[in-house]
Amino acid sequence: MPELVTDRGTLIQEGTDRLARAGVPEPRHQAVRIWAELSRAAQADLLLAPDLDVDPAGAARYQQAVKRRASGEPLPHVTGWTGFRHLSLRSDRRALIPRPETEGLVELLLQRARRGRVVDVGTGSGCIALSLALEGGFTEVVGVDRSAEALALAGENRELTSARLELVQGDLCSPLRAGTFDALISNPPYLTAAEYAGLDPSVREWEPAIALESGADGLEATTRLLDRMLAEQEAARARERRSMVGTGDRSAKIRTYNFPQSRITDHRINLSVHNLADVLNGNLDQMIDALRMTSRQELIDA
């Protein structure tokens, strides 16, 4: 008995009806999107030519996808594709599905920095890191994730986009050397254990818990990230102070620090102060007063 052939319009109407019975929102839109993404065709093609025949294998593949969506599986997992900013990326349960609001996080960083080295901590599918690599002018973009499965998915998306992206496995910032990056971006897990347990099954049953839950208060990952960033800032300040310690030629230095003698010297006004600890803690009153006096004297002399 020959296999039955159906047309695209009939097939998609059947899919719409099945999704509607399952309570899926916007069933027509989702039925059309499933067809378009499985066939990698524009949705307009379907509207222009709904009467084109579909071969039995194509019809079976579409019907199976509709069945999966009707059961509650997320649409990006069903089709295997998701959109993020200007990208079409592979998507499955190995990593969190990129959310539209995360696109704004990329925009915020690009408004502040477009050069240097940037790291995406908890890269997941790679959507943030890939966007930065393709839209910015960074010399280096690194994506870090502790999940080998997520990194494998990010690697597939890297191949799709031909972006320059280094992928590293590790827990948050643990594989990174201090002071090696100019910017850090992250969309860390932020749900409490109770919030995770109460998630809609369409999220809880299909997306990785490791990308959503973060301890009893939901802030475990965020706190650890902030602690690392504060340590980075303190290390940068310490490097700057050390770079200003006098070692002979002082002509290019504004201030030099002599830690053994607890002395700081401002070479603009030839003033030395023996309270280095206070100065490093922000007490600059004595130096500011001396600078004011010097400025006034220069005005008088002029």
Image (spheres, grey):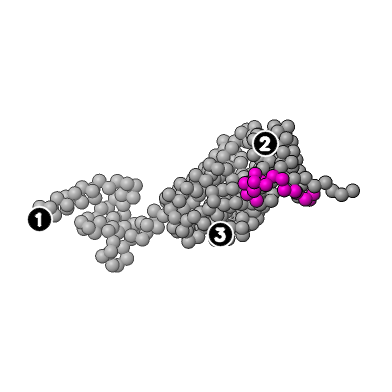
Look at mark 1 in the image and give the residue it sits on: 301
- Viewer-proximal residue, 56 or 301? 56
Mark 3 or 1, closer to the camera = 3
Residue 106, can we see it? Answer: yes
* x 43%, y 53%: residue: 113
User: Which label sits on residue 163?
Assistant: 3
Amino acid at the residue labelled 1: Asp
Which residue is situated farthest in the right direction here? Answer: 1
Going from N to C along the chain, the mark reached first, 3 or 2, is 2
Q: Dot 3: few (<14), some (14–19), or many (≥20) neighbours within 10 Å?
A: some
Going from N to C along the chain, the mark reached first, 3 or 1, is 3
* x 73%, y 35%: residue: 17
Q: Does the magenta stretch include residue 232?
A: no
Q: How far apart are marks 1 and 2 (CA)?
A: 82 Å
Amino acid at the residue labelled 2: Pro
Q: Is mark 1 on a helix, strand or loop?
A: helix
Look at mark 2 in the image and give the residue it sits on: 27
* Image spot of residue 101 (x, y percent): 53, 41
Q: Is residue 49 magenta?
A: yes
* Image spot of residue 284 (x, y percent): 27, 47
Mark 1 or 2, closer to the camera = 2
> Left or right: where does residue 279 sit relative to residue 189?
left
- From which residue to which does the magenta span run? 41-57
* Image spot of residue 5 (x, y percent): 80, 47
Amino acid at the residue labelled 3: Ala
User: Which label sits on residue 170?
Assistant: none
